[in-house]
Each structure stands twice: as C-alpha cells, then as structure tokens.
Image: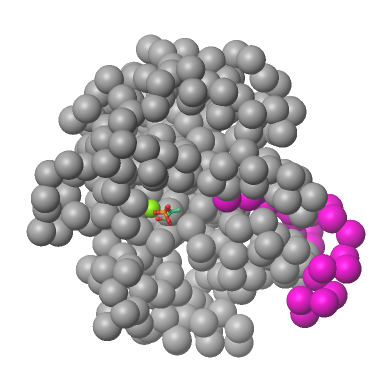
Amino acid sequence: SRAAASSAPITEGALADGTKVPLLANVGSPKDAPAAVALGAEGVGLFRTEFLFLDSSSAPSVEAQTVAYTELLQAFPGKKVVARVLDAGADKPLPFLNDAHEENPALGLRGIRALRATEQILRDQLTALANAQAATEAELWVMAPMIADVEETEYFVGLGRELGLRTVGAMAEVPSIAVVADQVLEVADFVSIGTNDLTQYTLAADRQLGSVAAFQDPWHPAVLRLVGMLGEAGAKAGKPVGVCGEAAADPALAVVLVGLGVTSLSMSASALADVRAELLTVTLDEARERAARAVAARSAAGARAAAAA
Ligand code: PEP
Ligand code: MG
C-alpha cells in the first residue's frame, strides 16, 4: 500500500531475488533535483531539456545551456543522468524550432526530425551537454526523441560522438524502431522507451484528445509486445533498455516491463516508493510469468487482469 511504501527504507531498486532494477527520476529542470534525490532516485532517467525553453523565442546559447545542464549534473555526482535533446513539436512546440503550420504536428517535424532540419541548434545543445559532462562527476548519457530507424540512430550517435559525448542512445517512441531494434542496438549505446508516445503511435490515438483517451493505455498487448521486442534485442546486444514513460510509474506494470526485459525504470519522483516496494515482491521468473500472461491477453483490461491473476 502507499502508506507502507512511503515508510519503507529507501534502497536501490531490486527484485525479491536480488536482480537489480535501477529506479531513476524524470525531471524538467535542475529545480527538480533535490526532491528526486530525497526520494531515493538512483539518478535521472529522463531530463526533458525542452521544458527549460518553452517560453524562449530564440534558440538558447551554448553558454546558457551549459550553466543549466551543469547545475543538474552537479546534483548527481557519480550517478547516471540521461538527458534528452530538445523534443520540440506536437504537445511541446518551441517557437524557435517549430514555425511552420502543420495539420498533424504529432506526425510532423517533431523531435529529432526538427533538430536535424535545424542542425546548428542540435550541435549547440550537444556541445553544451559535453561541456557539462566535462565539468562534473555525473555519468551523462544523451538520447534523442522520436528516432524511427537505424539511419536516424547513426546520424544522432555520430554527431554526439563527434561533439565529445560518451554514451549516446535513442528513445523508442515510434513503433518502427521496435521492429528494427536489432539494427538500432548495433549502433546505439542504449535505448529508452517512451511509453507515452509509443502508445499514442501504436494505437494511432492522439495522447491529448479526450475522445480517444481509452486507446492511450500502455497495458495494451500491442504496446507490451513492442516493449518485449526491444527488451529481447537489448539482451541479445548486451545493452540497456530502460523505460521513461508514465508506464514505469504504475507498480503492476513496472513488474511486467521488467519481465519483458526492461533493465531500468524512470518516473516522476513521487512514484518511486510504490514501484520500489512492488518490485521487491517478485522474482525475475515471476515477473516473466506475469509478462507472458499480459502479452497473451486480448485487451489492455485483459492484460491488467492477467498480470494480477
Ligand atoms: C514518452 O513519450 O513516453 C516520453 C517519456 O516523452 P514525453 O512524455 O516527454 O513525450
Ligand atoms: Mg515522448
């Protein structure tokens, strides 16, 4: 229960058999760091950098970005911090990156596509991240949103390495990336699954539209099967595959995700205690059994019930 979870000691994320599952925090600003640390985050699994610049009319300078990123990294000495480069477009338009009118912005020039079309903005951001990496003790990982295939992965990983970043990966939010996960994981150092967008695009249901909200359910077996494909490809490649969407904050679903091969979970810091407590109740074999029942279900509701059975 929530009360039991919040009074339990803060330990590293692990299953009942000792399998480690690092539990990380989603943050939008250096201001979020103290709460994440206090609630036992083992690092940051998603730093939504675009949140810093939603009100900016022009692209931020390398210097301003270096200051902000360094401030966040300093709060996590020796810990992992996964920064996402600007995810502009659709629900998070940035005036300096998204100026054209689009009928369907979720299917438009969003995320890595918008950055690639304005490459100097991406170069400046990667340079600022490399500066922060050099100035602090945190272990900085950098990833791009909305990567669709291995060609985009090669582009982003190549640019990140050229500009001095050590660990460079791809978010899995577009279903195509799960289909070619083996190719992507040959190139990327890691993958982090954004279940909010992965669900939106798998079920073709706008995540902001109330009339189709019932489709926006990461328990849907189609979404779980894509997660399983990514987890399996990660295990074969020997590379980490995390989840940083809201699905990781649902304790019962967190267990299923681990059973599908997910190696770390990142969520709002307020969700860490409940997820930590739930993981401690199952072994890896039990998590895999629950996952197998969930992916065999015929609906999101069916998967929830099957995992609990
Ligand atoms: C996601 O899509 O699951 C994700 C983590 O990114 P955002 O919610 O910021 O689009
Ligand atoms: Mg997303």
Q: Quadrant of ligand 1?
A: bottom left
Q: Is residue 71 visible?
A: yes
Closer to us: 98 or 10: 98
Looking at the picture, does residue 130 appear above or below residue 238? above
What secondary structure prevails in the magenta region?
loop
Magenta-drawn stretch contains 24: yes
Image x and y of residue 257, in percent: 54, 62
Looking at the picture, does residue 203 appear above or below residue 233? below
Colour style of the rendered protein structure = one colour
Closer to us: 26 or 255: 26
Quarter of the image that includes the N terminus: bottom right
Looking at the picture, does residue 216 appear above or below residue 121? below
- The magenta stretch spans which residues? 1-26
Q: Which residue is drawn at 27% across and 62% down?
A: 201
Magenta-drawn stretch contains 180: no
Q: Residue at x 45, y 86 (%)?
A: 301
* Relative horizontal placement of residue 291, taking residue 225 as reference (left or right): right
Name which quarter of the figure residue 222 lies in.
Answer: bottom left
Image x and y of residue 74, in percent: 70, 28
Image x and y of residue 14, in percent: 75, 55
Image x and y of residue 268, in percent: 61, 58
Looking at the picture, does residue 294 appear above or below residue 18? below
Q: Residue at x 37, y 48 (%)?
A: 172
Total number of numbered discs in the rendering: 0
Quarter of the image that includes the C terminus: bottom right
Name which quarter of the figure residue 152 lies in.
Answer: top left
* Relative horizontal placement of residue 304, taking residue 81 as reference (left or right): left
Q: Residue at x 82, y 77 (%)?
A: 3
Q: Is residue 279 visible?
A: no
